Image: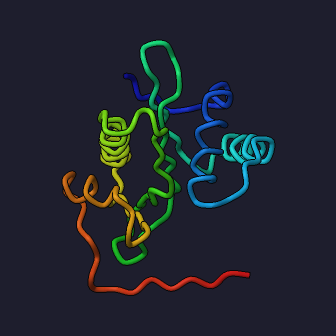
């Protein structure tokens, strides 16, 4: 398995993974909209996507980071917004490899770190905790949506 920073030329591998990710979160499949969304991320350079591939180049999973800042620390931070491993590749270290690459990238960029949020019943929490992520019990997160 290899992990690479995805670019526009990796869309054909990313689209089915990202579409599968959205379907996992009970959204309708829409590969064309996914392609447009990801293409826009690459054009605007407003996210970083890491792609896991097998020895034949087949996409196994991805993680997407969005840059942000901590005003208090006066440092860049990244939001690990998406992590997905296709069903057939789960339990084989793909998620761990993607998370490790995201950590290495954050360190290389001199950022404060990474944050993520997840459903309270997401089984990936075991992976996060095993990799040293800490559950924040000191703050509440609120959202406002249109």
In the figure, is residue 104 to the left or right of 58? Answer: left
In the figure, is residue 1 to the left or right of 41? Answer: left
Q: Nearer the viewer, residue 56 or 39?
A: 56
Quarter holding the C terminus is bottom right
In the figure, is residue 6 to the left or right of 103? Answer: right
The image's colour scheme reads rainbow
Q: Residue furthest front?
A: 88
Seen in the picture, residue 6 relative to 23 is either above or below; the reply is above
Q: Can residue 108 be seen by looking at this rendering?
A: no
Residue drawn at (44%, 56%), measured in percent from left and top?
80
Q: Nearer the viewer, residue 140 or 68?
A: 140
Q: Nearer the viewer, residue 144 or 130?
A: 130
In the figure, is residue 122 to the left or right of 142? Answer: left
Residue drawn at (37%, 22%), measured in percent from left and top?
1
Residue 115: x %, y % from top left: 38, 63
Seen in the picture, residue 143 relative to 37 is either above or below; the reply is below
Residue drawn at (64%, 36%), measured in percent from left and top?
16
Seen in the picture, residue 59 relative to 141 is either above or below; the reply is above
Residue 23: x %, y % from top left: 63, 52
Q: Residue furthest top?
A: 56
**Could you tell me how many numbered marks the image carries?**
0
Residue drawn at (66%, 25%), measured in percent from left and top?
9
Q: Can residue 78 be seen by looking at this rendering?
A: yes
Residue 47: x %, y % from top left: 57, 49
* Quarter of the figure with residue 71: bottom left
């Amino acid at each position: 398995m290899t992990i690479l920073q995805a670019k526009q030329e990796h869309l054909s591998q990313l689209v089915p993974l990202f579409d599968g990710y959205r379907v996992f979160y009970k959204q309708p499949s829409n590969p064309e909209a996914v392609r447009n969304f990801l293409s826009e991320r690459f054009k605007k350079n407003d996210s970083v996507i890491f792609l896991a591939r097998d020895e034949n180049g087949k996409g196994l999973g991805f993680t997407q980071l969005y840059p942000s800042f901590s005003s208090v620390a006066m440092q860049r931070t990244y939001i690990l917004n998406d992590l997905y491993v296709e069903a057939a590749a789960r339990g084989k270290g793909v998620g761990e490899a993607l998370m490790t690459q995201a950590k290495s990238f954050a360190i290389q960029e001199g950022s404060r770190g990474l944050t993520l949020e997840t459903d309270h019943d997401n089984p990936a929490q075991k992976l996060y905790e095993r990799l040293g992520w800490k559950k924040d019990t000191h703050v509440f997160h609120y959202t406002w949506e249109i």
